[in-house]
Structure formats: structure tokens, C-alpha cells
Image: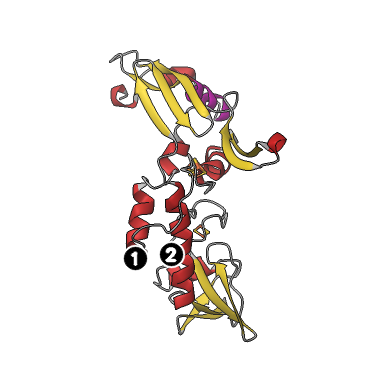
Amino acid sequence: MIKLTIDGKKVAAEEGGTILDAANQAGIRIPTLCSHESLRPAGACRVCTVEIATNGAKSLTTACDYPVEAGLKVSTTSEKVMEARRLAVELLLAQRPHSSKLQELARKLGVKQPRFVLAEQECILCQLCVRTCQEIVDVEAITFVAQGKDRGVAEPTVVHSLDKCIGCDACAYVCPTESITVTDIGDTRTINTPSGKLEFKLKQCQVCGKYWAPEKQLDYIIEKWHLEPELFATCPDCRD
Ligand code: SF4
Ligand code: FES
């Protein structure tokens, strides 16, 4: 175990864990946005900023991807920390002002109105969708690309590959800013993404006639786990 101090409290943390893990174990709450317990950290949003002191030198860092070190002193509530978090949320909110998740974070941190006027963005590049697709769904249908290089401006964005995407909607589920949305109408699932619209044919239940899951997703599951296709002839509600 690694011993460190968080907000003056002595904490024992698992080796290889992060400051965020250690704080959670000690019951100390650090706000997060791009972090998820089932995914590798990305350190993309800076909402989890904390102040650390090593060998007397203080600096700001992100708690979700900073590994615990013996003797580390961490402050989660210093004025510098709160300022850095407010700035991070202000910048995100300026890019995506209608996001209820960002509005809620801003309210909790005391940010009333962003001081910046930025062009509204489809996506805040938190990478939750990219990591979920890679690490949980195991499909890798979403990637980051830099657009506009020919104009000398590289604007990163997330791009869904229609070839690889199975239409499972996990990306929409994790997206904190409603930048990816899914609608099922009739026999078609439509996924609206920052890089465009994808459509998938839905499987019809042989018993009740309901369209219940993308055929491409079911084909993926059948192949991956060597299952019988007949298992998915009916929807979950009509199975014994
Ligand atoms: S689409 Fe959503 S989940 Fe994906 S990077 Fe953008 S904001 Fe994050
Ligand atoms: S939650 Fe740590 S950088 Fe986003």
C-alpha cells in the first residue's frame, strides 16, 4: 500500500491506483467529467484538477490519471484548485452551453455564466465514447481525427466508422453532452454523431413483431460468442 495525504487526512492507497481512486476510497469527493471507473483515464476535461506537493514544490494536476506516490500531499479544495476547475468548466460550457451535465457541474462549482464566447461545438472531446467503444464494446468504431489540415487549422473531432460501428448505442449512453443521440423508428435505428448520421436495420421479434435490436449488433454478438442465431429470433420480452 502507498501512504499519502489528501486534504490533511492520511490515506493508504493501492499501488498503481490514481489520486482519484485514493480519494474515493477515503470518502473524499473530487468532481469528474471524462472519467469512468470501467475505462482507462484520458485526463481530457481537467474537471478533476487537484493540487499536489512533492519535495516542497506545488503544482496542479488531474486526479483521474495521476498515479499515487508515497508521501504525496494532495489538496482537493484549495483556491487554486477551485479556480482551475471553474475555468475548465467555463471553457467546456462555452463550447456546449445547452448540456445539462455541464450546466449542473457549473452550478455546483459556482460558475454562473462563461466569461468566454466560443463557437458552439458538437463535441467537447472527452473521449468517453472512443474509450467505451474500444475498451468495453471491443469494436473500435470511433476515432479521433484532425480535420482542416489543408487549411492549416487542425480541429480534432470524433469520427464513427460505418463499416465498424454495430449500432449498439453505448457511445450515446456515455456521452455527457448529448452530442450523440439515438432514435429507433420502425425498423431503423439512427445514430446522430458529431461526424454525421448512421443508420442500422433493426431485428424484428418473431413473436410480438417489435423491432428490438440492430441486426449488425446481434450478428457481432453471435460471431463473438459463438451463439446460435435462433437465440435472437425473439426479443427479450418474448423469451421464456
Ligand atoms: S461525442 Fe460525446 S462522448 Fe464522444 S468525445 Fe464528444 S462529448 Fe465525449
Ligand atoms: S475527469 Fe479527470 S481529466 Fe476529466
Q: Amino acid at mark 2?
A: Arg
Q: Is residue 183 left or right of residue 13?
A: left
Q: Is residue 217 above or below residue 60?
A: above
Who's the residue at 37% across and 65% down the image? 109
Is the image coloured rainbow, by chain, by secondary structure, or in one colour? secondary structure
Q: Which residue is mark 1?
A: 110
Residue 228 in percent (x, y) is at: 49, 20
Task: Magenta stretch: give its range.
Answer: 216-224
Q: Amino acid at mark 1?
A: Gly
- In this rendered view, identify the residue nearer to me: 6 or 192: 192
Quarter containing the C terminus? top left
Who's the residue at 44% across and 39% down the image? 179
Q: Is residue 140 left or right of residue 79?
A: right
Q: Is residue 57 magenta?
A: no
Residue 72 falls in which quadrant of the image?
A: bottom right
Q: Which residue is mark 2?
A: 86
Q: Earlier in the sequence, mark 2 or mark 1?
A: 2
Q: Is residue 229 visible?
A: yes
Residue 18 falls in which quadrant of the image?
A: bottom right
Who's the residue at 47% across and 55% down the image? 91
